[in-house]
Amino acid sequence: MRILLTRWLRRFARKEGIDDATLCHAVQRAEDGYIDADPGGGVIKQRIAREGGGKSGGYRAIIIYRAGDRALFAYGFPKSERENITQDELNEYRAFAKVVLSYTDAAIDALVKSETWNEVRP
């Protein structure tokens, strides 16, 4: 399972103090069948707990996801600042998922090497 972050998400995680272990835990929960929301099209939403707090007051992550293969954290936001993403945004993430899930490992390696994406090692 490859766990990846967009450049934007890496900056967001750093700013909010979300470490790699926490991101890996969110993906492991999905792998174990605990998906907080599955709007389809290769997009899932996972809750991420705030340091020292619970998931209900924490963050939400939009993840491009294929079980057993790859998870790309595409977007995140504090639940206190935003209730959810819009339908238009969800449609854009579904279109993005279609492209991302078609990438070969070599294409992903190139994105990681160029630092467009970051790879998290569990």
Image (cartoon, rainbow, N blue to C red):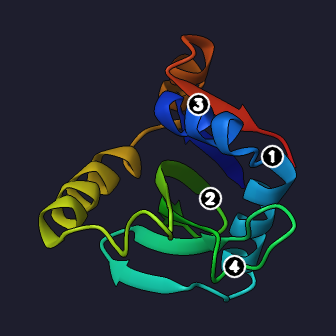
Three-letter amino acid code at the position of disc 4: Lys
Q: Position of residue 60 (x, y in %)?
A: 53, 67
Q: Which residue is mark 4?
A: 55
Of residue 92 and residue 41, the one placed in the foreground of this image is 92
Secondary structure found at label 1: helix
Q: Quadrant of the N terminus?
A: bottom right
Few, some or many C-alpha atoms within 10 Å of disc 1 (few <14, some 14-19, many ≥20)? Answer: some
Q: CA distance from mark 2 to mark 1?
A: 18 Å
Q: Nearer the viewer, mark 2 or mark 3?
A: 3
Seen in the picture, residue 45 relative to 36 is either above or below; the reply is above
For the residues labelled 3 and 1, say whether their Cβ atoms are less than 8 Å apart.
Answer: no
Determine the residue positioned at 16% across, 72% down. Answer: 87
Left or right, 7 with reference to 25: left
Q: Nearer the viewer, mark 2 or mark 4?
A: 4
Looking at the image, which residue sits at the far front?
80
Question: Can you tell which mark lies on residue 69?
Answer: 2
Secondary structure found at label 4: loop
Few, some or many C-alpha atoms within 10 Å of disc 2 (few <14, some 14-19, many ≥20)? Answer: few
Instruction: Point out the tag, 1 or 4, that comes first from the N-terminus.
Output: 1
Q: CA distance from mark 2 to mark 4?
A: 25 Å
Left or right, 32 with reference to 38: right
Three-letter amino acid code at the position of disc 1: Asp
Instruction: Point out the tag, 2 or 4, that comes first from the N-terminus.
Output: 4
